[in-house]
Image: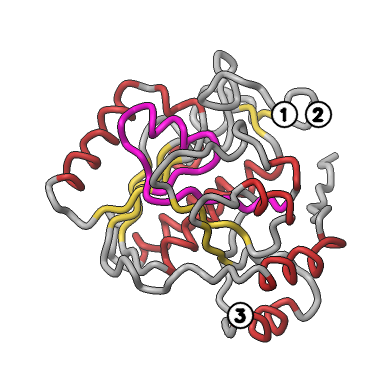
């Protein structure tokens, strides 16, 4: 029998406290249309980042950016440090997890020159950790009653980033707010193969929870391991790409490497 999977937001009880804190310390929403027409290179922290071809492709986009092309780099979580170590310091670091536990180098690396775009419901401890950094906000939809009305009251905007359950999907929303029109997505594995760790730094953060599943090779012939939130997020990214194809705008979404959304 299929198992029913329910997604819940464990941080709902902190929603109002965190949101009011961010508004009280004067943080503002990231600017709309500031990168109009740009290509967004969104780099997550999946194990495929270490593939030689992926590295070469990212280096190619970085070279085009250095040559004056309108290309913006977004680093997510540990990918911020990964990009910096590969001489591609991202313009932005994006995070949606509101918990205080992400207030550390392992979760949000502090790299000079990076603007951190944080969910407006992030815990006060995280903003304290980022006190010396440039920080902007976006609204990551949380499913709280009257959520949009609260955002509009505090920030004058009902704009939210939504889709999936992971930071990759919400980073796409941030890039859309910035006015980007093309999207290159790397490291958004949404799963891992048997011979891989879950993340590009070789750490299996979630294995302790043992909340994972596999597809038995049904997607592409080689087994994918994943978690419910990763699968749902990967499916949404695949649907996002297909939506452009249906409009006759194929090529606006580029997936780099062996990642589940590309296979889907």
Label 1, label 2: how far apart the Cα atoms are: 5 Å
Q: Residue at x 54, y 54 (%)?
A: 169
Q: Residue at x 24, y 42 (%)?
A: 61
Drawn side of residue 34 relative to residue 44, left or right: left
Instruction: Find disc 1 in the rendering and name its residue.
Output: 206
Q: Residues within 10 Å of mark 1 (few under 14, many from 20)?
A: few
Position of residue 93 relative to residue 205, above or below, is below
Question: Where does residue 131 sit, x and y in percent of width and height?
Answer: 60, 52
Q: Which span is picked out in magenta?
A: 74-98
Discs 1, 2 touching: Cβ within 8 Å: yes
Instruction: Find disc 3 in the rendering and name its residue.
Output: 155
Q: Residues within 10 Å of mark 2 (few under 14, many from 20)?
A: few
Position of residue 144 relative to residue 50, above or below, is below
Position of residue 48 relative to residue 185, above or below, is above
Name the image quarter holding residue 177. bottom left
As drawn, the label of residue 209 is 2
């Amino acid at each position: 029998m299929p198992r029913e999977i329910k997604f819940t937001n464990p941080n709902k009880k902190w929603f109002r406290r965190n949101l009011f804190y961010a508004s009280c310390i004067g943080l503002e929403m990231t600017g709309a249309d500031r990168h109009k027409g740009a290509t967004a290179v969104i780099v997550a922290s999946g194990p495929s980042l270490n593939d030689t071809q992926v590295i070469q492709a990212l280096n190619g986009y970085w070279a085009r950016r250095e040559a004056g092309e309108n290309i913006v780099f977004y680093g997510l979580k540990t990918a911020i440090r990964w990009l910096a170590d590969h001489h591609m310091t991202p313009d932005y670091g994006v995070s949606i997890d509101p918990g205080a536990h992400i207030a550390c180098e392992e979760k949000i690396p502090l790299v000079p020159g990076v603007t951190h775009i944080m969910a407006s419901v992030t815990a006060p401890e995280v903003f304290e950790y980022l006190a010396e950094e440039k920080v902007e906000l976006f609204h990551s939809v949380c499913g709280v009653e009257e959520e949009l009305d609260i955002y509009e009251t505090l920030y004058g905007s009902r704009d939210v980033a939504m889709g999936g359950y992971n930071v990759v999907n919400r980073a796409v929303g941030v890039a859309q707010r910035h006015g980007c029109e093309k999207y290159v997505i790397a490291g958004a594995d949404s799963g891992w193969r048997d011979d891989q760790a879950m993340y590009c730094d070789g750490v299996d953060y979630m294995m302790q929870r043992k909340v994972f599943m596999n597809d038995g090779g049904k997607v592409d012939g080689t087994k994918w391991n994943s978690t419910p939130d990763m699968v749902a997020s990967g499916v949404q990214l695949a649907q996002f790409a297909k939506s452009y194809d249906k409009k006759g705008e194929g090529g606006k979404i580029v997936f780099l490497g062996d990642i589940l959304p590309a296979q889907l």
